[in-house]
Amino acid sequence: MRSLPTRRTVLGASAAVLGSGLLAACSGSSGSSGAAGSGHGSMNHGGPAADVTEGYLDPAGPEVRAAEAARKATGPLTEVKVTATATPLDLGGGVTVRSWAYGDKLPGQEIRATAGGTLALTLANNLPEATSVHWHGLALRNDMDGVPGLTQRDIAPGGTFPYRFAVPNPGTYWIHPHTGVQQDRGLYAPLIVEDPKEPLSYDKEWVVVLDDWIDGVDGATPDAVLAELRKGMSEDGAHAAHGKTPSPATGGSGSGSGSGSGKRSYVSMGGHSDYLGGDAGDVVYAHYLINGRVPADPSVFTARPGDRIRLRIINAGGDTAFRIALGDHELDVTHTDGFPVERTKTGSLLMGMGERYDVLVTAKDGVFPLTALAEGKEGSALAVLRTGSGTAPTAGTRPAELNAPPLMADALKAAGAAALAPRDPDRTVEIRLTGSMTRYNWAFNGKPYTPDQRHPVKAGERVRLVFANATPMWHPMHLHGHTFALGGEAGGARKDTAILLPGRRLTMDFDADNPGLWMMHCHNVYHSESGMMTVLGYQL
């Protein structure tokens, strides 16, 4: 028996304490400390914080420590050790790649903790580059958020870092690096925070992780893909570096552009989705995966006819939205991004990168495809639900449920205490999304990310974020350390990641109840690393 939360604890920030200390962090070995670095991704790792936080709270300062103490973690302690390492990965169907992963599995080891308890995870970095761990969706203490150059130093090759924090809210989350484009390798794992008073009844739980895969295929790496994207596109859509027309890419996943040198190009050209407002993405992927398996050799979940199954679905992709359906089944949506919603039934869901949905299904008798279409691209991911006899679905299987418009988060309402209390905003922060494929210059307000950017807020405020998308591309917007009411309405679904279509505006209301310096960014990893990031900063 499992159950869903009916209440969420709103964690208040403590009163501000003047002054700013040094950021406890780690670079090279467990337990070392130093000032925050001044960069993100590949920029300025590990430098001194200097005056970039002047007038703002320190990510490891007294206000953050007081807010953590107020969470009063009295539940169980979960201790986990994870190693980030270069390793071969078997994707099934005879496809083996060499990539980076947490351990030797894809996805990485599932992490389970209990709301109200403490999670202590030590990351050992056996990679050839610095890295970090970000806890996507968790409203945790700021100095554990895992953003190098902002909340911690890089974890250097050969080093370790002990993450430890109170786990505030139950739900479906995940972990990944916040360093360069590392997330588009195999560095991700599900994080499930269980509710000790779970009110939802079900028989089995199926964690489903979606991904788009390119690393190690024909020598490709996400860094090489980013370098190609940064060359931009000509105004007629040809790749500016070579001007060739699209040609089929190997791997059966879509169209790429010829490089003129015999090398495969991974720049996407011509992918279109009406649901995403036009251009579907920037990257052609070789494979689309569910739980680390290609469609030709899918993972299989076994159950009995009549079982109630809770699916926890995570989009860990780098550049791909997925439209997902379970053949011959109706999805009963119970949560998005960890928080409960008014129960809504649908045949399919459309999920941007970083989004999560929990759904319930009552299993029928037979063999059924769980299909995730790469929205606006060619190809799909596949897993199988087996409860009885029947012919296994193939990679080309398309459940009829995918023919109807998919459900998206703006159609959902927060359930019960997950609804944000009605209140006028004390502060409105307006941000314009800018950039194009022509120059690949994604940014906020025309300015690419620099570590000294701050959008100020104060503890206790109701803040309204208004994002205006002036680009021709859709963007999944992600806010660290908080959840917001989607649409700026008290009853809007509680989210931390939301799709913003081209030419549209996206309003998010949240309570400033978690002090620190928090990233806001597009969760297309190539857009964020190109500059579409900024910082929400609590003022002293």
Image (cartoon, rainbow, N blue to C red):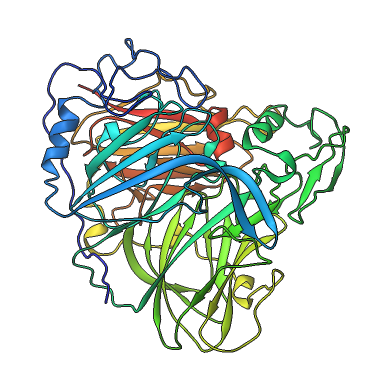
Front residue of 445/19: it is 19
Residue ID at (17%, 45%): 11
Q: Position of residue 385 (x, y in %)?
A: 53, 77
Check the picture and name the quadrant holding the C terminus.
Answer: top left
Q: Could you say which quadrant of the image residue 245 lies in?
A: top right
Q: Could you say which quadrant of the image residue 144 lies in?
A: top left
**Residue 155 seen from this side:** yes
Residue ID at (21%, 36%): 461
As drawn, is 86 to the left or to the right of 116? right
Q: Position of residue 457 (x, y in %)?
A: 27, 29
Check the picture and name the quadrant holding the N terminus.
Answer: bottom left
Residue ID at (19%, 24%): 61
- Which residue is the extreme one toward the top? 50
Question: Looking at the image, is 317 positioned above or below residue 12?
Answer: below
* Count of number-bearing discs: 0
Front residue of 129/276: it is 129
As drawn, is 282 to the left or to the right of 337? right
Front residue of 82/173: it is 82
Q: Could you say which quadrant of the image residue 207 lies in?
A: bottom left
Q: Position of residue 369 (x, y in %)?
A: 59, 75
**Residue 492 seen from this side:** no
Front residue of 199/175: it is 175
As drawn, is 430 to the left or to the right of 274? left
Question: Looking at the image, is 99 positioned above or below residue 344?
Answer: above
Q: Position of residue 480 (x, y in %)?
A: 36, 39
